[in-house]
Image: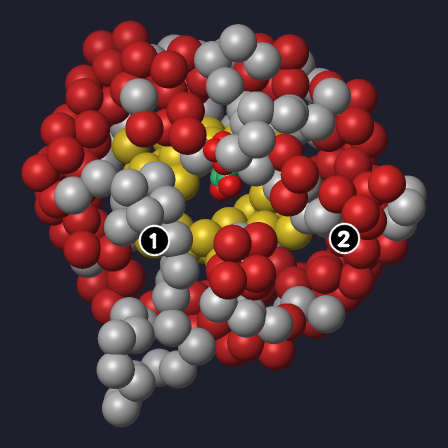
Amino acid sequence: MRKNIVAGNWKCNTNLQDGIELAKAVNKLVVETGDKKATVVLCPPFIHLTKVVELVDSKSVSVGAQNCGAEAKGAFTGEVSAEMVKSTGAGYVILGHSERREYYGETSEILNKKLALALANGLAPIYCCGEALETREAEKQNEWVKKQLDETVFNLTAEEFKKIVIAYEPIWAIGTGKTATTAQAQEMLAYIRQLIAAKFGNEIAEGTSILYGGSCNAKNAEELFSQPDIDGGLIGGASLKAGDFIQIINAF
Ligand code: 13P
């Protein structure tokens, strides 16, 4: 049985003190009121990782980074390697977020290096894909997403791919308040699962957690998560409020 996952991507928000408070608040709510139907992952900024790992109850809350470097180590000023992320106790890393692709020029080639290093260091990548509005309007979203997967995670071995979580995040739905309709999200996630089945077989496709992200909130999570192929969410804005985030976590 594949896991339900609700991951909070804090993006570039919260200073260390505010991040600690937010992680404590989410941890308390998950421990006291969480219904345990989903794996909860907090993805704070890098500098918060060690503290957040220390303060959460590791049986209830997992921790991930939002990115990692494309090189293992060395003279790469400002970079944070996959090994460093792993050494904090984090278990996940978001890779290929559309904001990284768009603002920091992350290509499939770069992402392949990051994926390899994340996997070599025992991190579970949450690999993001998703199309821009023009692509959706041209009804080319399936081709777009297939290409993003073909160029990256579909080149992994089956054993490696089993560690991957996929997050479909249509760019037009991120931070816009314009969620994909439940039907649009279900349709795309079912399509992605079908692509995984064609590449790696049914068993792996059925075992892969595929998340939806993009203006998912306390109000729409239940309907989204009720769909057969939607195994949870990658949550931006609504993960910054513990009260909203716990409602999403308990929306299965
Ligand atoms: P929002 O939930 O703020 O739309 O962000 C989604 C996202 O990009 C998560 O990675």
Q: Is residue 79 above or below residue 206?
A: below
Residue 220 percent location from the top left of the image: 58, 13
Disc 2 residue type (three-letter): Val
Residue 194 sits in quarter: top right
- Residue 209 seen in the current view: no
Numbered tag placed on residue 145 in the rendering: 2
Q: Is residue 215 above or below residue 30?
A: below
Residue 79 percent location from the top left of the image: 30, 74
Disc 1 residue type (three-letter): Ala
Which residue is found at the position 31% from the left and 13% from the top? 243
Observer-nearest of 250 and 15: 15
Secondary structure under badge 2? helix
Numbered tag placed on residue 65 in the rendering: 1
Extreme residue in the right direction? 139
Q: Is residue 232 above or below residue 209?
A: above
Mark 1–mark 2 CB contact (< 8 Å): no
Residue 222 percent location from the top left of the image: 57, 11
Which part of the image, by quadrant, shows the N terminus? top right
| Mark nearer the N terminus (1 vs 2) | 1
Observer-nearest of 80 and 118: 80
Badge 2: residue crowd in 10 Å (few <14, some 14–19, many ≥20): some
Residue 219 percent location from the top left of the image: 53, 9
Which residue is found at the position 28% from the left and 62% from the top? 85
